[in-house]
Structures are given as structure tokens and as C-alpha cells.
């Protein structure tokens, strides 16, 4: 396993880290023995970071990770997330602080390495939306996080880059956060490259480049596109996370990708991981897996290395035609 500095933070990350969300399901719905086995094997394979959130099973993922940590000698980096509700807007720093201490209690920790905002970011009003103005204003999200960082109860600040592309780009260009989780995969690589003019999917507008200008750590997420880039099996937990997308559309796009690439570059999951590894501006790749077999499959992709440039180039006609092959 390779390691690198995570952006401008003091954290040093493995090239793959373990996601523990609802999509893979283990840390929300799985058995305790399976959860411990997966975390233990992840550490053995060199993954030094676990990513979770209060929103994963309404705290179940954090609670289950906390239980596992008491049985492990290793002390992996832990990142988790908070959300801002409409009723929190009158005291955003207070809401963030309450969320942090609730997460600390569930995880059994006294400090979080990376604390991330996990809301839909948009300039458009909505009951579940938060605007860049509310994030960046005095006594907004950034101020609340900086206070916690100064107090020593978190080491780094971050946000999940989901929402309106222009709003996300504004946050990236502000340089206000230490880290960003960025949607990046073979079905939508727009966060990391310029897309053809005919592109109809959500265009993240080179978000990664804007983040890197400020030394913001970049964590690729949704690398399996809710599983459609990893397996033909469906759990019912799949959900598309960006505009102009649904699972049936994502499945069609995935069939186009693998119809073109075949199985010459590893399994589907390995090909998806290798695609992310090919972008040097991505610090780490967050993989959500169900069990140790899926974990080991993903880790083998790091030994195989990034996809070659000619393979990346072969995908460009798919993007230019919006997968209409």
C-alpha cells in the first residue's frame, strides 16, 4: 500500500481508505463479527483510514466502528460527518459542536481527525440545502469548524462536494476547507477533467483543480457509482448522487464502459479503482465494500496500478456521445 500526505493537512493517508456507509451496508446492517473482521483485514492490508458519518444508519456506523476500535490495537485515522438542519441556521457553530460531541461519544474517541459537512450545497433555497453564503459567513459552518480545530477536538475540516456545481466550485475556490470528498468515477469524471460540449451529465467543472490550488485534500468517493461499476448484483440500497442520474441510467452507462473495456484491466471493481488511481490530483480513494473478499479485490488494484493513458483516452468517445453507443 502506498501512502501520501493528505493535502495541506498533517494527515498521511493510504491510497485506499475504507468507507463504511449504507451502500456497502456492513457497518449499518451487518453482524458484529463481520464488522470487526473487515476492519481488522483493512488494517492488515495497509488501509490506515476509516470514513463514516452520523447519517449512516442514524449513527449505527459510528457506534459499530467505536465498538470495533475497542477490540483493535491499531488506531486508524477516523473521519466522520455532520449535517445542518433548517432549525440549526440560527446557531450553526453550536449545531456543529453538538454533532461533534455526539459522534465522539458513539465512536469512543476524544478527537476526530477529519470532520466534514455532509449537506446538499446549493444557492437554490430548499429544506435540505445549505448555501455557500451560510457556509462562509461569520458564525457560519467554516467558523464553527475552525473553532473546534483551534480547540484541538478535530484535526482537519472538510465537506462532501454534492450539490449545485457552481456552489461547489465557489467553496473550492474559497480555500476555506482542508478536505473535500469529490464524486469521481468512470461514469462522471467531470470533477477532474474538461468534458465535451455535448456532455449531458452533471458537470462538476474541474472541481479537483480548484481544490488543488489551495492544497485542499481530495478524497474520491462514489468510485463504484453506487455499485454499478463493481458488480451486477443489486442490494436495493443503491442511489444516484448527482443531477441527471438515476440507477437505471447509471447501469446503462456502466454497460457501455465495460462493453468497451472488457475485462482486460481486472475485475469491474478493480478497473473502477484503477481509473481513480490514474488521476494524480486525487490523494486517496474511498472504497465501500461489503466483506473482506471485496476489500482484497479492491486492494489488488493498487498493485495493478493506474489505468494506462490509452485506456483513459478510449473512454472519451463515450463521454462525447453521452454513452449513446
Image (cartoon, grey):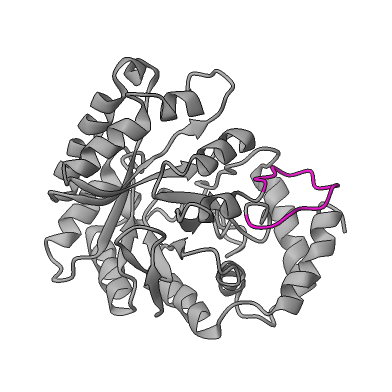
At horizontal 52% and vertical 43% (from top left) the residue drawn is: 172
Tell me the residue at 30%/69% (across/down): 48
Magenta-highlighted stretch: main secondary structure? loop
* Rendering quarter of residue 122: top right
Q: Nearer the viewer, residue 86 or 140?
A: 140
Q: In which quarter of the image is residue 267?
A: bottom right
In the visual, does 231 lie left or right of 255? left
Please state the horizontal and vertical placement of residue 35, each as a whole percent of the image: 27, 62
- Drawn side of residue 296 relative to residue 249, left or right: left
Where residue 47 sits in the image (x, y, percent)?
34, 71
* Rendered-image quadrant of the N terminus: bottom left
Residue 141 location, x and y as percent? 36, 31
Whether residue 180 appears in this view of the structure is yes
Q: Is 157 covered by the magenta stretch?
A: no
Q: What stretch is highlighted in magenta?
A: 192-205
Q: Taking 255 as reference, is 76 left or right?
A: left
The number of discs equals 0
Residue 194: within the magenta? yes
Residue at x 41% of width, y 48% of height: 22
Q: Where residue 147 appears, x then y in whole percent?
A: 23, 36
Question: Residue 28, relative to residue 10: is it above or below?
Answer: above
| Nearer the observer, 225 or 204 | 204
Between residues 294 and 5, which one lies in front from this camera angle?
Answer: 5
Residue shown at 39% from the left, 49% from the top: 178
Is residue 262 in sight in this rendering?
A: no
Amino acid at each position: 500500500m502506498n501512502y501520501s500526505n493528505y493535502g495541506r493537512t498533517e494527515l498521511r493517508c493510504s491510497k485506499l481508505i475504507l468507507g463504511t456507509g449504507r451502500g456497502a451496508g456492513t457497518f449499518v446492517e451487518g453482524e458484529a463479527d463481520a464488522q470487526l473482521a473487515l476492519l481488522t483485514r483493512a488494517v492488515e492490508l495497509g488501509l490506515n483510514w476509516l470514513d463514516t458519518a452520523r447519517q449512516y444508519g442514524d449513527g449505527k456506523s459510528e457506534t459499530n466502528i467505536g465498538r470495533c476500535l475497542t477490540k483493535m490495537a491499531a488506531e486508524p485515522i477516523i473521519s466522520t460527518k455532520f449535517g445542518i438542519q433548517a432549525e440549526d441556521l440560527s446557531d450553526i457553530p453550536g449545531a456543529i459542536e453538538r454533532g461533534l460531541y455526539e459522534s465522539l461519544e458513539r465512536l469512543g474517541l476524544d478527537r476526530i481527525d477529519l470532520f466534514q459537512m455532509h449537506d446538499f450545497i446549493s444557492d437554490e433555497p430548499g429544506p435540505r440545502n445549505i448555501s455557500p453564503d451560510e457556509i462562509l459567513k461569520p458564525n457560519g459552518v467554516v467558523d464553527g469548524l475552525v473553532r473546534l480545530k483551534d480547540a484541538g477536538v478535530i484535526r482537519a475540516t472538510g465537506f462532501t462536494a454534492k450539490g449545485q456545481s457552481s456552489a461547489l466550485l465557489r467553496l473550492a475556490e474559497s480555500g476555506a476547507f482542508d478536505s473535500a470528498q469529490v464524486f469521481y468515477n468512470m461514469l462522471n469524471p467531470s470533477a477532474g477533467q474538461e468534458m465535451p460540449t455535448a456532455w449531458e451529465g452533471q458537470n462538476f467543472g474541474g472541481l479537483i483543480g480548484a481544490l488543488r490550488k489551495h492544497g485542499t485534500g481530495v478524497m474520491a468517493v462514489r468510485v463504484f457509482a453506487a455499485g454499478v461499476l463493481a458488480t451486477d448484483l443489486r442490494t436495493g440500497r443503491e442511489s444516484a448522487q448527482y443531477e441527471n442520474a438515476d440507477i437505471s441510467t447509471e447501469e446503462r452507462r456502466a454497460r457501455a464502459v465495460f462493453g468497451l473495456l472488457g475485462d482486460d484491466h481486472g475485475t469491474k471493481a478493480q478497473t473502477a479503482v484503477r481509473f481513480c488511481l490514474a488521476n494524480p490530483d486525487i490523494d486517496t480513494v474511498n472504497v465501500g465494500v461489503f466483506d473482506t473478499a471485496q476489500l482484497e479485490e479492491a486492494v489488488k488494484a493498487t498493485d495493478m496500478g493506474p489505468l494506462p493513458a490509452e485506456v483513459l483516452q478510449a473512454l472519451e468517445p463515450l463521454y462525447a456521445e453521452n454513452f449513446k453507443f
